[in-house]
Image (tube, grey):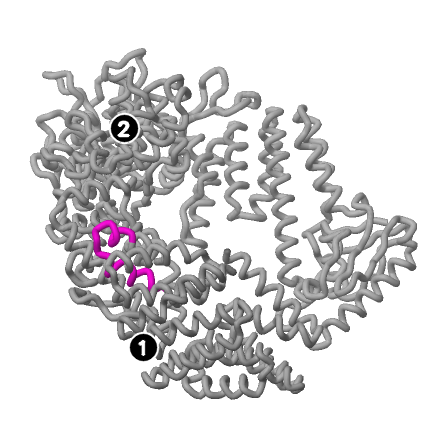
Amino acid sequence: MEFRLLGTVSVDTFTGPLPLGPAKRRSLLAALLLSANTPVSIARLTDSLWDDTPPLHARSVIQGHVSRLRALLVGADAEAYGVELVTLGDAYVLRLPETLLDAQRFEELLTLARGQRSPADAVLMFKEALSLWQGPALSGAFAGRPLQAAAHSLEESRLATVEQMARAYAALGEHNRAAAVLRAEAVAHPMRESLAAALMTALYRAGRQSEALDWFHRTRRLLADELGIDPGHELADAYALILRGDPGPDAGREGGRNAPDGQGTAARGPVRPSGGDGGSRGASGDVAVQADRPTGTATAEPPGPPGDLGGAPSPAPPRPLPVPSLAGEPHPTDLLPRAPRGFQGRSAELAALTRAAAGEAPVCLVTGPAGVGKTALALQWAHRNAAAFPDGRLFADLRGFSDTGEPALVEVLREFLLALGVAPRRVPESAAAAAALFRSLTDRRRLLVVLDNARHSATVRPLLPGGTDCVTLVTSRHRLEGLIASDAARPVPLDVLEPPDGTALLAGVLGEDRVLAEPVAARRLAELCGGLPLALRVTAARLAGRPSWTLAGLADELADERSRLTYLDVDDTGVSAALRLTVQQLPQDAVHQLARLGHHPGSHFDPYTAAALAGTDPVVATAALERLAAAHLVTEAAPGRWVLHDLVRLYARGMEPEGGPEALTGVLDHYIATALAAADTAEPGGEPCFVLPEDYRRPVAVRDFVDRATAMHWLATERDDLALAADAARTAGLHDRAWRIILLQWPQVVWRVRDNWSPLLELALDSARAQDDAYAESRVLNLLGWVLTEEGRAAEAIALLERSPALARQAGDRLGEATALINLAVVQAEQGELDTALEDCGRAVGLAREERDAHTEMLALQHLARMQLTANRPHEALASVRTALDLGPEHEEIARRVLLLSTSGEARLALGEESEGILLLDRAAGEAERAGYDEGAVRALQALLRVTAEPEYRKRYEEAVSRLNDDG
């Protein structure tokens, strides 16, 4: 007996295949085989058998197919083979020895093949594995989504096996065989880039270079036409390998392009006239290169009369004289500076550059902040890929961020033209003419042009070469979006180094022994430098010149933010100098915004926060942030959410130190205003949780929250920054802002009470007491006491809450007194003092009614009802719940409404009204689940499970508990 998935889903026996019947039954068998010896639930089988909404009788259909399949297996004596189809609760399991399943044998053969030392043995096992395939996987089954995914996974494994077998052939030097097995699959899967790349490599190593290049261009065009994308890294790497003339392992065994006799043909355009090699291209209208007799410098000679670059071709073009070169070989132009020393990491970015360079006339754009290593990356890539550019490599520093100013465009073009062999007297005087000549000369060359430190897209465009085989590599601190739009530049953004690469950079300068002697300090230095290569190199330079200094000692110095930038400057080089050159190019409004961002106490900011810091409005702030982002001084970590690199923040703080207090007060008041708006949206109808400070300044604009979900999301995402803002306020002596910013998070505190709020609230209490403010202390004690109660710290909660009502009365805060009495009553009830708790809670209801505050009255009634239920007074509990629900609209205050419904349901159960009670509790649980209020869902479902064993309630309860545990 044999089970097949690699082809038509079937069961083969000595007497022939079993008559499985319809596609749905084959689908069921396939689903069971894919999880052989593992239970498969009815729900999963349903997904496999139906694509859209399953029929109401789906379970019966599945049971029927299982019954028929079991009968077929029993009739084929499956038990003798150890095969059994078993029912396990709400699932089925097909038990069988895995040797009977073709997919399992396929995987075993692959494992064996990969472990072979001999490529010849590996080829045999790969062939045997592939012979198990008798068509597309899971044929004959209904293609439900799970089975589609499984079939795709199996097909991916088959294709990977073909590629591995081709590599084994290549290891044997049998490149033509490798190409043969790959071609059939590449034809069937024309957009699978790994197949195309492997086929290109096999063809190239078999000496069939033109076919390899043809396959690349065919695939590139197909990807562009069908998907609108450029080749990925595998295809680009294969193309680069061919262009470089890299033989790769064993390339010469079948006579590839790098055979020992050296007669392989380079993958390049027409040979340039140089060293006596060939004539001019005057007949085609191109410029020929000719030696300038008086100076010995190569010159560009037009095919027609002198100066007539567009004239008719000359019948007898002048023969180019040889250009002296070492070893008698062509000597391509090379203006590149030396390769950077101590270059570390950046493998992903180097690979991205290689992919970007695989297109047609590509412009690759390396962007990033000052000091991040853009030039080093560009030069490293250029030197690594020198062989891909046989006609030369040009380099120009455009000095877009320099004190000396940008060079004249015509001067850059003049340098390029002279390097390409144009005589000085024939270089045009205008930039436009020089650019036209440059494009003409590079039209059919394979050339690399590196344009470093570009400031504007307009500076780059005239310097772009004309040839489709030329690659232009641009670096800039700006995003140069204009160049992306006009010339399809492919951005390669550069970020800071990860700590391991930063540590390796230090070791490259200082030596591994010094770094290995203090590995912890080395990593700390890398982190204090923010992963910025420039900062790391300055740090290494300081240490290299002072062998007696320890890494830990310098790390301690850098830890002081007040002097960190000073330590990261040496001579005329350093982080401050690099940032200054970037900042001086900015308009004044962007400079002012950056300076104020340096005083931000948080880790991130949005346009409203930026506006509050700078004293502007969000529209102006957004424009400034866009300019700063274009200069890579701020980073947009998420839509509308920006961050500053630590070293940029320190630099910005020093730009306008006198503006610090104003910026801090502005951002604190912004947080108060925004958190008030969020709390009012999240829990509408209640009184503000405090009065505003006397010197409070409302921001120009405050964020508007459209619904409760967005308000709660803001409070959750801003929690850390709100804590940082409160801490900054305390440090600055602004205690009246500190406790308010913390207290305003009460909707999140209520929603996620288990989320360790007490330390933050204790800081708020310290600030309230620092002001000797009874009003503030009472308000903070109310919330802190309630949190401690929920955390099970009842004794601590009572000690705090007993002081709160008196403080509120002292401050004339009657609603604060009511809230304090409620929270105190809750703890008293938990401690068994039920009569006292009922009395205090009743007093709270009365105070709230006197103040005509429905929100606080509803809160008091909610807790009073719970206490009445505990005291076995269900009628009174129901009356309190009805009064509370009548006070507010149903759509408001979901958490409170859920708790009231739960209490009402439990009261009905206590009165013997079981069906009504279950209905109310189910309603409460449903509303809580829909709102994401897991605490309320757990409470309602717990009460349900005390009176019913319905599996659905058990499942929902466990899911709600799991969500609570996951949240912390």
x and y, in percent, of residue 787 in the image: 44, 63
Q: Quadrant of residue 777?
A: bottom left
Q: Which residue is mark 1?
A: 814
x and y, in percent, of residue 32 in the image: 75, 57
Query: Circle 1 sits in a helix, a strand or a loop, which is it?
Result: helix
Q: Camera-side residue: 419 or 341?
A: 341
Label 1 Cα neighbours within 10 Å, binned few <14 / some 14-19 / many ≥20: some
Residue 269 visible here = no
User: Is residue 728 part of the magenta span, yes or no?
Assistant: yes
Residue sitting at x 71%, y 63% = 45
From the image, give the main secondary structure of the stretch colored magenta.
helix
Frontmost of labels 2 and 1 is 1
Above-or-below relation of 858 to 38: below
Q: Which residue is mark 2?
A: 393
Decide if residue 743 is on the left or right side of residue 691. Answer: right
Label 2 Cα neighbours within 10 Å, binned few <14 / some 14-19 / many ≥20: many
**What label does residue 525 carry, if any?**
none
Residue 57 visible here = yes
The magenta span reads 727-745
Decide if residue 333 is on the left or right side of residue 520. Answer: left
The three-letter code of the residue at mark 1 reads Arg
Above-or-below relation of 862 to 82: below
x and y, in percent, of residue 839 in the image: 46, 79
The three-letter code of the residue at mark 2 reads Arg
